[in-house]
Image (cartoon, rainbow, N blue to C red):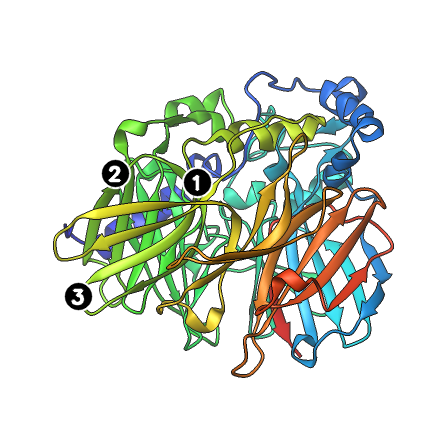
Amino acid sequence: MHPSRFHRRDFLALLGSLGATALAQAVPALALAETATPEGAGASDPWMTDFDAALLRHDWSLGWRTPAGDLKGVAKVEGKFPAAVTGVLYRNGPAGHDLGGLRYHHWFDGDGMIQRFEISQDAVLHTGRFVQTDKRIAEVGQGRRLVEAFGTKLPDRIAVTSPDTLNTANTSVLLLNDELLALWEGGSAVALDPVTLATRGVKTWRPDLKAMPFSAHPRVDRDGVVWNFGVGSTKDVLIVYKIGAKGDLQRAELVPVKDVPMIHDFAMTERHLVFLMPPLVIEAERLMTSSFLDAHRWRPELGMRVLVIDKDDFGRRSEFELPAGFLFHLGNAWEDDAGQIRVNYVRADQPDFIFGDARLVMRGRYQSTPATKLAVATLDLKSGRATQEILPIEAEFPRIDYRFNGKRYRDVFHITLALDGRPGFAAVAKTNIETGANERYEYGRSRLVEEHVFVADGSGPGWLIGTSLDVTSGLTVLSCFSAADLASGPVAVATLPYALPLGFHGNFQRT
């Protein structure tokens, strides 16, 4: 189907409304419905009390402890990092979970902290700094929370004038020219100095796009062009961005999507952008009394809708439907000459994690839910048919060799092996999505494994680097593997002298 374009006047009018309080409430964060926190909760906050007690009982709860402040340290290195991995790994994640005796009620709510690992062949220097958003500066200055979070419903104490009033800059990073962008998805990217991690301020691509949603999962084409999107939940639109390799905004258009759901990630081929849309849809009238997450309703009758947008003409769009399911992350997509798009992603039957697990860990509790699995969908642009295959492989945080972005590929790197009796995964793996062949390296039960990213090495198979939290020693470890031989284990490890809070996404930059 090819809905008509928005006229420029409609675009500007809708941008204005999206930048107002209505969208400021429509930000990807999460809360627990059973616990609308009263003002002045202070030290009596049961979430804080329960979590403090859990730190003494459950070693894994260390991953959700708030650091006392910024961090700086030298890692102990065993082995030797390959020359190709000489550079910087940047990671981002929520770290500021408590303030003024009150603890957030969802993992996704915390203020963002950037981790910078400066890697040479025999040394790793680490810096961790909180992103100094306007929100964090104001709240730390007063020693208390001033606005509600993505998922914790709090009485507003200051006016919410735009999505950036709530911006936590806590999900991912993008290095673009001389700026490191800390990415959220309900509002602006926040620019940082890539060396010192000092916060420079919000990134405004164009004056009329100020404070507009900008996803935490941009896709970078092989020519350096950056594609991204934002979700206008209460207005039933996507904002689609095309940004030049030098950081210049080339296009930004609104795409109407009825019952637009919560969308965290997307994929691209050489000619198209691909959005898988789980049926978790906002009911705007609930925003007055619920957190952003709790204003959503699971509507499996809508199925998993798929929207495909032509890169050259955003008005040329196709829609498909898959069986209902939930997802956060996609690996890659490609299309053949016959007009078939294949896209892989990590699928769950229902949004159990976002409503359950990601909340309970903030209280130091664990709830077992079915592990997510790798899945591959085929979209036939000519017939309009869509099919799906679910692989019997537990997975999260899929990454690929970025040299194959938008092209045919086979290997997906991901974490795997869900732990029994505690949250998280214990292994890193490589899966051939065409044959199902899988190899993995098991860190062991004492490790909570985070996302691993691919590092190219000329025309060779490359390397995989990533972090894990050793809950027995209470230390974070950076490991490097040959991408061709994960099972043999890391060729180098760097152990920090402290534990980092568990985070989400990162990217590597060669120096």
- Which element carries disc 1, helix, strand or loop? loop
* Picture layout, residue 380 above or below residue 64: below
Viewer-nearest of discs 2 and 1: 2
- Residue visible at 76% across and 76% down in the picture: 120
Q: Is residue 77 left or right of residue 261?
A: right
Marks 2,1: beta carbons within 8 A: no
Mark 1 or 3 closer to N-term? 1
Give the residue type that dot 1 points to. Answer: Ala
As measured in the structure, the alpha-carbon distance from the residue carrying label 3 to the one carrying label 2 is 29 Å
Tell me residue 228's x, y (percent): 41, 58
Q: Is residue 267 left or right of residue 411?
A: left
Q: Is residue 245 left or right of residue 336?
A: right
* Picture layout, residue 216 above or below residue 349: below
- Residue visible at 60% across and 67% down in the picture: 485
Residue under pointer 1: 20
Marks 1,3: beta carbons within 8 A: no
Tell me residue 161's x, y (percent): 51, 40
Give the residue type that dot 2 points to. Answer: Lys
Q: Is residue 167 left or right of residue 118?
A: left
Residue under pointer 2: 258
* Picture layout, residue 467 above or below residue 406: above
- Residue visible at 74% across and 48% down in the picture: 469
Residue under pointer 3: 338
**Residue 266, visible in the rendered structure:** yes
**Residue 506, visible in the rendered structure:** no
- Which element carries disc 2, helix, strand or loop? loop
- Please identify the quarter of the rendering in which residue 316 is found: bottom left
Viewer-nearest of discs 3 and 2: 3
Mark 2 or 1 closer to N-term? 1
